[in-house]
Image (cartoon, grey):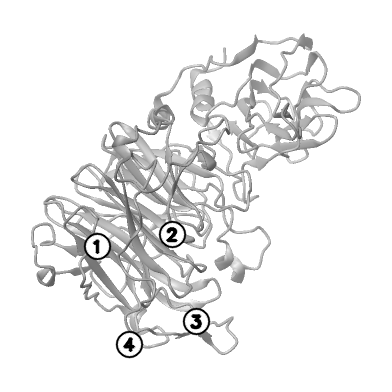
Amino acid sequence: MPKNQNAAALADQSLTAETISEIPDWRHIANGWKIPSKGYCDQPYVVKTDDGAWLCIMTTGTGREGAQGQHVVSARSIDRGQTWADLVDIEPAHGPEASYAVVLKVPYGRIYVFYNHNTDNVRKVKGDNPPYRDGYCTRVDSLGHFVFKYSDDHGRTWSAQRYPIAVREMAIDRENADGGKLRYFWNVGKAIADDRAAYVSLHKVGGFGMGFFTRSEGVLLKSENILTEQDPQKIAWETLPDGDAGLRTPPEGGPVSEEHSYSRLSDGSFYSVYRSIDGYPVCAYSRDNGHTWTEPIYQCFADGRRMKHPRAANFAWQCENGKFLYWFHNHGGRFIGEHPDRRSLSYQDRNPVWLCGGIEADAPEGRIIQWSQPEIALYDDDPYIRMSYPDLVEDSGKYYLTETQKDIARVHELDTSLLESLWEQAENREIATEGLVLELSQPNLGEVKIPELPAFNERDSASPYPTRDLRQGFTIDLWLRLPSLDAGQVLLDSRLENGQGMCVQTTERGTVEIVLNDGRTENRWDCDSGYLRTGEQHHISAIVDGGPRIITFVVDGKLCDGGTNRQFGWGRFSPNLRHANGAETLQIGSGLQALRIYNRYLHTSEAIGNYQAGCP
């Protein structure tokens, strides 16, 4: 992680940089640098100013999300997010709610910020399937007028006047509980621009009730003269797409399509990805500058499998190298067996964050994005901590993410090599060698000496002797061919009589599981069902990642995501599990064709590379 600059370089900063955590894993969010706020903090979006600073725009307040006093602020950093100057109010805390700002810098250096403003100070709104006692929702931060202010001094001060944007009425507006007289909406993400126009996303809302927003769809606001026109009252806006409806879910999908993220492709096409309550992210392309869009589909990996995602922000960004990164949470968000009316409540499990790499490819209708399989990029030890509403910042060849847990916002520097591996994943045919501690080709039945596996935690030698989390892991990587998928076939086993050790075996679901036991607690997780077939050769990587304490399986080059049988393809193991060491020898069962053991967790891309390199 980058270090603080000297005191002279920080002369105009009023906050001290957060002490970098001693947690030995850059992915842990506590290793990030805090962005100042007033308590609640949301959507920390960053633009690089023409004087070399980072300018962060944020929604903040002393209350909880949606409370009175919520307003929009800015802050500047001259050391790439490590420290920040004092907050500047773009809107005052004592005014009507001002929320959910996005930022745009135009070519001559002016910076615009666009946000919701409850200008008319509406204090309640009718609910359409109300969980509200009197039929009214009193949270009023997602309605009113869409407005902007601007700064001509790199975010140090902001225009005194705010300027409303006339957004074209659509059916979703006319059909709301106020008949369109009061507009419901909000915004997230990045505004984007090319050499002809600027575009700002907006999410129209059709009603408030169960899950807060009960119906939503996306539009794009386009201005052809904002890039050069300096009189804000002369800036003209067009609402896209054409027609009476915005971007929605696929046919037969749910009523919620929101938080649209837009990117430009090299052929001029627009790409948009957004959340639903269907358990999958949705995407669409426009080949005519946003006027019309392809029929929305659920987003897929390059191999054709649907991605899975809950009701949470999922953003795609185009990088300076022309490639893309995609933030999502890699699980279905819908709880198997739960009543479908409760899908709208699936805002949970935004931890960890996963990233995919995207590259452009040709299709008959134009350029498209092909997405890699994902890697864990950020996490917290507490599974209930949620991180979301990110931004991507590139600076001097480095990549940074911002994110918020709603009461703390941070900046995180990413490992560039991890991103490169995502973009190169499809071509990777190299065997991972770092951390390889045991390699057997065509292993015989019987036993072999097993290297000691890394411990996950230990007693801290400092008083009062608490647990020290070592953030280590290991990987079992093997090729096999099984004559049957009967349960209980032991492939690898290092367990002692008391169960302590590690075991890989078949299950009643026709899967392979890994069992971890330290003599005090036992944990297990298996691959997705339907991947293994009798008599066929398969490659399996069981990755035990001691950072987020997550087990993943990669089977024949595919990261298990739970399929249609379970919400999660990855499973957590206990933070109290000390290790998985047992006997000094490893028992090898029938069916194994090759075995590698690593004393570290492999990245998804490395496991895929091992598969694509072929069986030794």
Which residue occupies the foreground of this view, 24 or 198?
24
* Element on which disc 1 rests: loop
Label 2 sits on residue: 42
Label 3 sits on residue: 138
The Cα atoms of the two marked residues, 1 and 3, are separated by: 36 Å
Residue type marked 2: Asp
Name which of mark 1 and mark 4 comes first in the sequence: 4
Q: Which mark is residue 105?
A: none
Examine the rendered structure and indicate whether residue 518 appears above or below residue 44. above
* Residue 7 visible in rendering: yes
Local packing at callout 3 (Cα closer than 10 Å; few below 14, some 14-19, many 20+) is some
Residue type marked 4: Lys
The Cα atoms of the two marked residues, 2 and 1, are separated by: 31 Å
The Cα atoms of the two marked residues, 2 and 4, are separated by: 28 Å
Label 1 sits on residue: 292
Q: Specify whether 552 is left or right of 148.
A: right
